[in-house]
Image: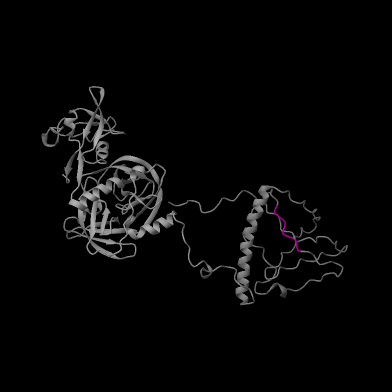
Amino acid sequence: MSTENEGTPVPAGPAAPSAPPVPPTSLDKPAGDAPAQATPEAAPEPTPQAAPQPSPSGDEPTAVQAPVPAAAPAAPHQPPAPAAAPTGGWPTPPPAVPAWGVPHPPAPPAPRRRTGGLVAAVLIASLVAGGIGGGIGYWAAERGDNGFSSTTVSSGQAPASFKRDPGTVAAVAAKALPSVVTIQAKSGGQEGEGGTGTGFVYDQEGHIVTNNHVVASAADGGTLSVTFSDGKTYDAEVVGRAEGYDVAVLKLKDAPKGLTPLPLGDSDKVAVGDSTIAIGAPFGLSNTVTTGIVSAKNRPVASGDGSGGSNSYMSALQTDASINPGNSGGPLLDASGAVIGINSAIQSTSGGFGQSQAGSIGLGFAIPVNQAKNVAQQLIKTGKPVYPVIGATVNMNEKGQGATIAGQGSGGTPSVTPGGPAAKAGLKAGDVITGFGDHPIDSGPTLISEIWTHKPGDSVKITYERDGKTATATVVLGERTGDS
């Protein structure tokens, strides 16, 4: 995100001069070399006065007046003595002279103290000071070294180290970045197509957690490499993939010692408004850190990588932290640096969820880490995912009324598996499931997203409608191993 305005608007007021007044003498000579004008002996030495503030009203800038002696009056009928030029800078500009034949105007009244005039004076002073500084710098450079010393502070004079306070974004990012990796995946075909994604260290044995769609192209005969934030690269292999969950686990072939796993948080305890930090490689830009908040919880998302494979379903954490292609598989952290989700999908302007090349519009979605942790443990243990099921086929196209149990299943099979969890709970074809646990259900994808947040064997209350009447039942979730 970027700011559109890089300056503060200037309040309306008299126009400020764009450059300092032109000095009467050349910059190649110091002020002291100018011819001196005769000064009457009776005239006392004038006391330098601050330049008057411009009048707050009027369309034209007020002419700069010469300083006026403070106390002693000048001798009658004698010209006033000029003000002494400031040492080391341009001389004071000459007094404004009225046109020939025009009577001398009366002395202007003292300006009233008004906020607008004060602000304008401060702004003009800043501009003039910048112009004078430039003139002095040029004059000193032309004359060489004549005793002036620089007032700027070089980096060598800055503190040797600058420590960020714990809990700041900079501190969290600095601690997490060494445990976040950029993944390069190439297919086994002749063209070697692939892509870039992100992952993070899961344990000290060298397991890396990422999205399935990041490594899918290299899963069968392709190659995978993992690059850490220090630039070191290692070859990796797929341990297991869960297409439906969009989670995959890799393992480094020659894992270095001293790997630091990222701490895992509790996504169930996340609240809307909590701070988030996303780390990844958007468009191949490794080690990119963006921030935002948790915008919503339990957001049902069905996403695909556009390859025609099966969609993944998640009850996602929504965040406005900038997430782009290449962020996929990277960690979504909370303010303490614990992983609360795996960045997986974005809402694109084309109206669909996925991992296309569209950029961030502030609608990113992450797999809750509690779900991802269960899947990762399954993949490390058996290499295959395990999915909880209700044993019923639901319509995936209708939305808004609930998840309707279809008239028949795939290939003409019964839509409610005989002896399965739904059948045991008394559900039938045509029933419309409107609630699963504490969450409302508006479609088939929403139902699957909620089912997959549970484990096989969990007992869940289902609310459904049949013949216009609402009823409830308790279903004990079954299981399915592997992607079908």
Residue occupying the far right of the picture:
76
Q: Residue 175: where, in percent of width, then height?
A: 38, 58
Tell me the quarter of the image containing the C terminus: top left
Q: Residue 2: where, in percent of width, then height?
A: 45, 52
Q: Residue 477: where, in percent of width, then height?
A: 20, 37
Asked whether 466 or 60 is in front, the reply is 466
Asked whether 354 or 85 is in front, the reply is 354
Magenta stretch: includes residue 53: yes
Residue 282, picture quadrant: bottom left
Judged left or right of residue 451, residue 106 is: right
Q: Residue 396: where, in percent of width, then height?
A: 22, 36
Q: Residue at x 21, y 33 (%)?
A: 475
Residue occupying the far left of the picture:
412
Q: Which residues are magenta?
A: 48-54
Q: Residue at x 60, y 68 (%)?
A: 151
Judged left or right of residue 269, residue 237 is: left
